[in-house]
Amino acid sequence: MSRLSRTGALRRRLGATPRLTRRRTARALAALPAALLLALLPTAASAYPNPGVVSGDIVVHDPSMARTPSGQYLLYSTHNGLELRTSGDRTAFSRSGSAFSSAPSWWSKYTSGTDAWAPDVSYHNGTYYLYYAVSSFGSNTSAIGLATSSTGQAGSWSDKGTVYTSSSSSDYNAIDPNLFVDGSGSWWLSFGSWWTGIKMIRIDSSTGKQSGSDTTRYSLATTSSTAIEAPYVIKHGSYYYLFSSYDKCCAGTSSTYKIKVGRSSSVTGPYTDKSGVALMNGGGTPVLESHGRYIGPGGQSVLSDVDGDLLVYHYYDGNDNGTPKLGVNLLDWSSGWPVAY
């Protein structure tokens, strides 16, 4: 699909338009000679789509986006008390303060100042929930915190303290949280970075904290290098899908981050990739990797919007000294697997 078609899909929010364009493109390609078709095939580096057009204040890391009932987009990201950007059209974003203007006192055990990470914002039953991580780079003395708000706006958040923690003696890292609410109303929190990989715990919906009746820490995914983090779980059809960021983040144009996915018939796993390899054995089907100027995409979240599912992530801009920027792509579903376009 052309860049123009992808941009139009993002701006018009018409889910049928991309499929129609692809069918017409497929018919046109079928009429071309085989030699010309081979010449038109993309190389591995260019096989992934570029992000849809976004503008304004888009220098972000670990973005998470929610859509308010009135249609405003709230985009929270790492650093500075969890930065907020807002948009009315999902294209132009402006800086709108931070979730926290000062750090809750308990943060000092895990970090200095207001440097919180990897927010996860969502809206349930009239309340916005903001899960996030407090830690220092390379350490697993970490905590997942929770704040709630009736509006989701900067400065409106009420600190609810810690949800889950890890220490230097833990074999996991309590960062990069993601809340998932399943069809039966059960709440689950996935999290994890390096060490033994991606974990999940049951959440009590009345408190937003860990369930007292199910304290199991489930293991969902890991790799031989242990370079996996930033889980995000969604439900599509009859399967649960676990998106994660693999390999090295936070190194500008030297980053090797990439987004992969696996699926399961149960929210707690086991998850396998498209080839049937278990995510606990290093599996993962690529969704988005480096291509052109868009280096190391990851730190992803998924928003189910009016025109389909959105993959929201950061990448390092090879044309701007590796500055981390916002990327947004729609997801198509092909034979039960997500494809970015």
Image (cartoon, rainbow, N blue to C red):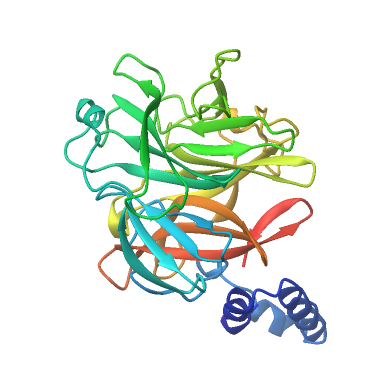
Which of these two is toward me, 172 or 41?
A: 172
Where does the image place residue 54, in percent across and percent down from the top left? 45, 74
Q: Against 33, is 301 above or below?
A: above
Write down the quadrant of residue 114 in the picture.
Answer: top left
Q: Against 140, is 228 above or below?
A: below
Write down the quadrant of residue 182 in the picture.
Answer: top right
In the visual, does 29 lie left or right of 255?
Answer: right
Residue appearing at x 17%, y 36% in the figure = 112
Quarter of the image containing the C terminus?
bottom right
In the visual, does 125 lie left or right of 24?
Answer: left
**In the image as oriented, which residue stretches furthest toward the left?**
112
Where does the image place residue 179, in percent across and percent down from the top left? 54, 38
Where does the image place residue 260, in percent across and percent down from the top left? 56, 47
Residue appearing at x 57%, y 24% in the figure = 204
Q: Is residue 102 visible?
A: yes
Which of these two is toward me, 213 or 31?
A: 213
Q: Exactly how many numbered labels are in the figure?
A: 0
Where does the image place residue 149, in percent across and percent down from the top left? 44, 45
Q: Against 300, is 263 above or below?
A: above
Q: Is residue 289 visible?
A: no
Quarter of the image containing the N terminus?
bottom right
Residue appearing at x 60%, y 33% in the figure = 279
Write down the quadrant of residue 276 in the picture.
Answer: top right
Residue appearing at x 50%, y 58% in the figure = 312
Which of these two is toward me, 64 or 50?
A: 64
Which of these two is toward me, 308 or 286?
A: 308
In the visual, does 259 lie left or right of 242?
Answer: left
